[in-house]
Amino acid sequence: MKVYKYRSNYDRDVISLFLNQLFAPTYDNLNDPFEGIFNNQEDKKILEIFKNLENAYDELVTMVRKTGVYSLCKTYDNEILWSLYSDSHRGFVIEYDLDILLNDFNYNKIVPLAHLVEVQYKDSPQKSMTIKDSYNKYMNFSSIIGTKSLSWKHENEIRLIFEESGLNTYNFKAVTSITFGLRASEKEISKVMNLMKGRGLRYFKMRTCADSYQLEIIDIQDEFVNAPEYIQNKAPFDKKFMSADYISPEYHIHIDLLKNIVLDVCSLPNIINVDSIEILGELARPKINILATTSSKKVPVRFFEFEFHNGDFVQVNKCTSN
């Protein structure tokens, strides 16, 4: 699934893009003054019966208030959003592959670092079931920070919710294209292309359709298409893991593929070190297991599992947005 972020600042926003970072503010710093308003009548009924839950309930609500919210849109050609969030069509829109974006935050299925919320638009605040959801070990963010009034329906919003507000580093491959507004200058377009060179991005520009109120998109050429390939990270690893002496002889035919996989893992965001590599299973369909240390305090270890299919190894423990 592709999702989009409308941007306007060619200094701040482009630097964040260059650094592969997104900033998720707390919801009280968003532009809707009604953010975080919810109907807590159901919660109050439970609290009237179980008084001992009041402190835990307050802690849960406080936790939600500290979460970071990164707002995205499902479309790139929303005329109103181009005007509101992209400096009256002078800015640009970032296209993300949502599956790639989530995979490097939610590599642990039990402890996800990012939650996906599709904003619901209603004529009254959503009823909160915070206590019931918590009892079932499920945190539903949509009742508190996933509901907006019908007047915001044009934004067609989808949100990534992080446990804490602030900067988050993502996999650069999650950004698949950049679309510039119809009033974007050639100077700013060239600046972005220069900073983002070597990443295999596609570039587009918006323009008006003749005799209509519609916008259309056109391809524009990357000025730095022949730039060296960009590498995001270079985490260290013990070279013995890829040596013929370390790997059982029957797996030597897969050493080149193994090297490519290890280098790919080392280039991922937030990987600090590759701790162990194991190749095992049947010779015709071997498996590769890799254990790495991450920069996340909450999930400091990341496990990669690859299986051999059609002449190559494919990661089988990826996260998807579905």
Image: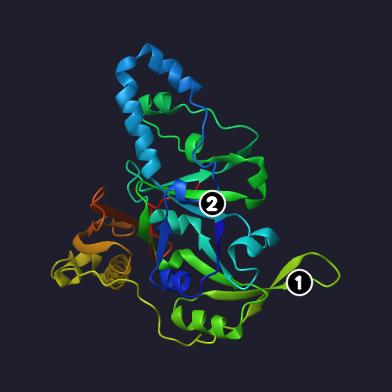
Residue 267, horizontal then vertical, whole percent: 31, 69
Give the secondary structure at mark 1: strand
Q: Is 131 situated above or below 318? A: above
User: Type of residue at label 2?
Assistant: Asn
Colour scheme of the picture: rainbow
Residue under the image location 36 percent in, 56 percent down: 166
The numbered mark, 2 or 1, whose residue comes first in the sequence reads: 2
Mark number, residue 62: none
Residue in the foreground of this view, choosing between 293 and 151: 151
Residue under the image location 26 percent in, 48 percent down: 298
Q: What residue is pinned by disc 1?
A: 208
Image quarter where the N terminus lies is: bottom right
Residue in the foreground of this view, choosing between 80 and 157: 80
* Residue at the extreme right: 211
* Residue at the extreme front: 33
Asked if residue 76 can be seen in this view, the reply is: no
Residue in the foreground of this view, choosing between 266 and 5: 5
User: Type of residue at label 1?
Assistant: Thr
Contact (Cβ within 8 Å) of mark 2 with mark 1:
no
Q: Is residue 59 left or right of residue 33?
A: left
Crowd band around label 1 with a 10 angstrom C-alpha radius: few (<14), some (14–19), many (20+): few
Residue 251, horizontal then vertical, whole percent: 24, 65
* Residue at the extreme top: 49
Residue under the image location 36 percent in, 59 percent down: 167
Residue 155, horizontal then vertical, whole percent: 63, 52
- Number of numbered discs: 2
Q: Quadrant of residue 76?
A: bottom right
Q: What residue is pinned by disc 2?
A: 31
Quote the CA–CA distance across marks 2 and 1.
Answer: 28 Å
